[in-house]
Amino acid sequence: VSPHRFDAVVLREYGAPEVLKLEHFEREWPSPGNALVRILATTVNNVDVQLRSGRLGTHRTLPHAPGPDMVGEVLESPDPSWVGKRVIVNPSSGCGRCHWCAAGARNRCKSFQIIGEGAIWGGYSSLVDCAVANLIEVPASLPTEIAACLPVTFGTAWRMLVGQAQVTPNDRVLVFGAGGGIAVAARRIARLLGAEVHVAARPSNKLDRVAAEGFTVWPVNLEELGGLPKKLRAAGDITVVVDAAGGDWFSTGLRILAPGGRLVTCGATTNPMANIDVRHIFWKQTSAMGATGGTSGELIHVLALAARGVLVPEIDRCLPIREAVAAHKAIEEGDVFGKIVLTWS
Ligand SMILES: [Zn+2]
């Protein structure tokens, strides 16, 4: 182990986008048994914005480098066959010893944390120190910028629709949201699975772009959410609802579901508390399911489908990482359709 000098965009306090600063560091990495990855690209996820602002809690040791999306090149590894390989890092980190970790489901481990969101530095650092088990090789034909968009949003959405809700061509899926990373991934995966896909979101030119992709859209303001279940039921049974907003969106999703339907959630960007009528669960025999990131097996599927061009993420823009502040501002202003990629090269 030798000291490595590297750059990282870190926060030393929680707050506005301007708290993100590019600094130099020196660390004796990799940790014993770990690999060291030189990061090529990361992205801005909602979780990065929430972390930076302090909304995910203020328990981390600062400075901290966010960025659960990571594509890079392996510099050092106890297994030398990884060295030089272009990889994504599965951001789900576990103890590596329990039965969940052994089964590949690190996102159920008691020590589960998301790299970049928990204590471990993510892709806003140009070097990442991670377990070898988290490395996944990127297919040669898949551009780095596209691979960077996949781990958090497509990995999570794949877990939601395939692993949890088990969507089939017989499903009519409703996705809440138009331009957010999870919304884009969920509707494109649901369509790939053969389901009929509907999208409900606040009226905007983003929803027009969703309609142009061929999805059935339902413009709805927050104050009109109460009327949405009736309108949608007239269009047919909604058997799966995909939600990342929480609050009134989550409770409306449960009301919309047809008997036997499944609501699957991966976030609470508007409100973690939802007022639900339990009759919508027992009388209709519905289920509410959660997802936190994909397993490495699921990420390998997603990478392969992206390499074939069957699954395509939406890239809003690519920026050098020194423009992380501007990228966070754009996300907060809602001025984004799809992902902002931050590159280290
Ligand atoms: Zn474990």
Image (cartoon, rainbow, N blue to C red):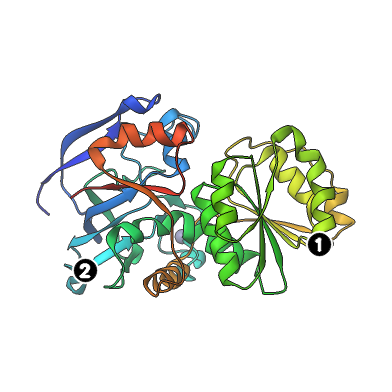
The residue under the point 45% across, 49% down is: 338
Q: Which residue is mark 1?
A: 236
Q: Is residue 115 visible?
A: no
Disc 1 CB within 8 Å of nearest ligand 1 atom: no
Would residue 99 be seen by someone viewing this image from the given angle?
A: yes
Q: CA distance from mark 1 to mark 2?
A: 48 Å
Q: Measured from the top left, where is residue 126 in percent x and y?
A: 21, 47
168 sits to left or right of 13: right
Mark 1 touching mark 2, by CB under 8 A? no
Circle 1: element type: loop
Q: Residue at x 65, y 42 (%)?
A: 246
Depth check: give the residue in front, 263 or 306.
306
Residue 270 at x, y percent in the picture = 61, 35
- Does label 1 or label 2 sit earlier along the sequence? 2
* Residue 149 point in image, percent of width and height: 39, 55
Seen in the picture, residue 111 relative to 26 is either above or below; the reply is below
Splitting the image into 4 quarters, where does residue 268 fall? top right
Q: Secondary structure at mark 2?
A: loop
Determine crowd level at label 1: few under 14, some 14-19, many 20+ residues with C-alpha closer than 10 A. Answer: few
* Percent position of residue 259, x then y: 84, 62
Image quarter where the N terminus lies is bottom left
Amino acid found under the numbered disc labelled 1 = Gly
Q: Dot 2: few (<14), some (14–19), or many (≥20) neighbours within 10 Å? A: some
The residue indicated by pointer 2 is: 85
Say what amino acid the circle numbered 2 marks. Answer: Lys
Q: Is residue 213 above or below residue 227?
A: below
